[in-house]
Amino acid sequence: MRTDTPQVVRLEDYRPSAYLIDRVDLDVRLHPTATRVTATLAIRPNPAVPGQAPLVLDGDELVLKALAVDGQTLKTGEYEASPDALTIPHAPARPFTLTVETEIDPTSNTQLMGLYRSSGNYCTQCEAEGFRRITYCLDRPDVLSVYTTRIEADRDEAPVLLGNGNPVETGEVAGTNRHYAVWHDPHPKPSYLFALVGGKLGHVSKRFTTMNGRDVALAVYVEPGKEDRADYALDALERSMRWDELAFGREYDLDVFNIVAVSDFNMGAMENKGLNIFNDKYVLASAETATDTDYANIEAIIAHEYFHNWSGNRVTCRDWFQLCLKEGLTVFRDQEFSSDERSRPVHRISEVKVLRARQFSEDAGPLAHPVRPTQYKEINNFYTATVYEKGAEIVRMLKTLIGEEDFRRGMDLYFERCDGTAATVEDFLGAFSDVTGRDLSHFAQWYAQAGTPRVSIAGHHDPEARTYRLDFTQETAPTPGQPDKGPMVIPVVLGLVSPDGEPLAISCNEVREDGVFVFDKTAESLTFSNVAVRPVPSVFRAFSAPVKASLDLTTDALLTLLRHDTDAFNRWQAAQTVAMRMLAAASGGAPFNEAESVSLTGALRAFLERDAEADPAFAALVLTLPSEADIAQEIGSDVDPDAIHEARTELRRRIGRHCAEPLERLHAGLASTGAYSPDAASAGRRALRNVALDLLTAGDAAQGETLALRQFETATNMTERLGALGVLTTLPGRAREDALSAFEQSYRDEPLVLDKWFTLQAAIPEAGTLDRVRRLMKHEAFSLANPNRARALLASFAMLNQTQFNRADGAGYDFMADLIIRIDDLNPQLAARLLTAFSVWKMMKTSQKNAACSALRRIAGKPNLSRDVGDIVQRSLNE
Ligand code: B3K
Ligand code: ZN
């Protein structure tokens, strides 16, 4: 474990590597505890770096077994080897071959970085710095090599052997029960994209013909017996490949594309060249075991990893500071794919919900950092919502600014120019400046300045002059290391709506025909002419920029937007804003404003009666109130989680009562008929049905329990079964416990389904939940070493259960601190991820704040703290 004092890596210190590695030939002899790796590296001094430097190869917990230069074994004194580095002070000043042999133990690798075992199968994870746990190497993304991998294993233990690139050869090792496979990847790549898999796996497959006629064999490998649950992933892969050809002109470039699902994985999936490795949660799906959300996530993540083949692999990153270059761009691409495959407005709302919940909260706390950070202690801690989600928003804003056609031309130029290179954010923006002739230097601040800009907008109508003026101001609060902020380039997509809901023609010089106003100063005013009556402004349509906007709109004006705006996102936003205002005020102790409550519940009822059936997925979103965490974030300081919970429960109760009739009708009318289909329209109906059940239950517990039990017992798919169980968990008592036991019995052999069961229980907002979670940790299916299990129970408790994690007595914090300390010895990345639940501690009220602070200090004081957890805990405490 790396427990060294965290060293800071800085962007400004970037220097090209003194050596390059043109070819890597690996011979990996798999063994459960003593895998032998022989790496033959074709190395040469980098002509771009003059002078002679020692050769320093990276390692991590490695044991060197043999070392030779051009076939000559090196003598003691000619090199230095430690677990984390191999140094040859006087390496040849010409091309040479280095042969390195190491021995590694995949079975004891609980960090899940490098080569490890999952359910007995061998697999790898190398991004960001896992390859150095396999062999000594230049483990940095700007050293690109052509890899050939020979994998050898016992035939019984690992009948399937997969590597990057194309299969070249297979054979037997004479006189043994071992066999081997050789894989060759012709595309130069950095070490983080290396992968191999060996194990007992079944698969489903299909052929794909690319736009230029290349025949590709696609396959998805899973645990034997689960092949039928891989069909949807395979279908999503095929659709992604076709979409990338049409939307971005990107064609696949190998003869095979393999996906392997494993049960122990630190994140969602990994885009290794030609051999994507996935958390099985994002591959396996059937109507009985997966929800609609699971299907949508599978589709999105399969697409994401596939799209990396160009945005990440063909064009990779010069250094890890450029991570958003591949991640932000690839998230943007997968979001576009899902929007095209499903409903664009519905998907946009879901994207923004995630952005606000995860990125805005990150940006508002001690872990705030720019989309392109300038320093890190542990790079694994920078795979954040800021790099991914805000990174995607920057690409989307760029597209809005320059328009669809120039965006595509810029993307084409970027891919063409940077193909086969390790690029930077400047290379990316440079392609767009070159195709448009625009100076994007001010826009580039989005990569450099952390924090969420706040945009305030005030409207003034002058009936005599028949003008309407909108005054815009923007500011960004200080974030760690960045006290002073400048104005950002903010594309505001806007429209005006008449008081009776008609769209108004816009005449204003600063607003483009497509409704875009580029707001790039601290303050600016727009004057619209020919406006007879005071209109309702609809700003940031489709959420055109990742900012917090505040408008001086009345509840009536907002409800006009809910009813009439042509922009679906702003219809949803209007209902959210009205609800959020009420919830934030009520959470501060004020009683509900009765008039507003009546207006909102009335508007929602009218909406349900008029619009819900036309677009159930959208209606489900409109009917869902901001989460407790969202409300806490809105309040921002001295947060009382119990008051928030009560306010939200009360508002749900009022909506449930006032809308009972249409909700009952919808709940009955939307019941599933026929075979399950995961398509977006069917999923939308199930989503609305579940929301209707939840609100009805909030309004009338007895009626809700009856309906929920019936839905639970008769459901023919997991979405409806889990929806009903979720509603039942809001009702303490016998029925809930019986339903939970029945669910447990039905799925006792389905770990991914039991994860849902763990999550629901961890999220119950009751005082007994902490004990329940403690009990569940002893469940035979639970394991702290498995990231999916740990996240399902523990991350859900810390991140979804606002009242119980943030208990005033500090028991929730202490519980999590103890576990983080334990998990840190097994899997530092997982521990660090769980720790981010504490990142909003400073906005809680004093009792909670003190308790969180002492829990954090206790973590900070743990002996042998990993670099991962050390970094997060220090930044959280602001030390
Ligand atoms: N690139 C990987 C993430 C690697 C995380 C390393 N700690 C998955 C993805 O974003 O596609
Ligand atoms: Zn990615």
Image (cartoon, rainbow, N blue to C red):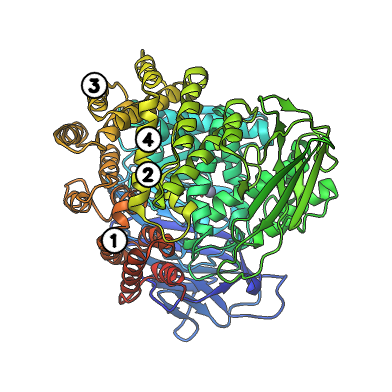
Amino acid marked by disc 1 = Ala
* Residue 257 visible: no
Q: Nearer the viewer, residue 532 or 748?
A: 532
In the rendering, at what x and y percent does residue 547 appear?
Answer: 61, 50
Q: Earlier in the sequence, mark 3 or mark 2?
A: 2
The Cα atoms of the two marked residues, 2 and 4, are separated by: 9 Å
- Tell me what residue is drawn at x 45 percent, y 48 percent: 585
Q: Earlier in the sequence, mark 3 or mark 4?
A: 4
264 lies above or below 319: above
Q: Count neighbours of disc 4 (C-alpha within 10 A) and say few if under 14, some if 14 to 19, many if 20 or more.
A: many
Q: Earlier in the sequence, mark 2 or mark 4?
A: 2
Mark 3, secondary structure of its residue:
helix
In the picture, the disc for residue 808 is: 1
The Cα atoms of the two marked residues, 3 and 2, are separated by: 29 Å
User: What residue sits right under mark 3 in the picture?
Assistant: 710
Q: Nearer the viewer, residue 619 or 447?
A: 619
User: What residue sits right under mark 2 in the picture?
Assistant: 647
The Cα atoms of the two marked residues, 1 and 4, are separated by: 25 Å
- Tell me what residue is drawn at x 47 percent, y 62 percent: 381
The Cα atoms of the two marked residues, 3 and 4, are separated by: 22 Å
In the rendering, at what x and y percent does residue 588 appear?
Answer: 41, 53
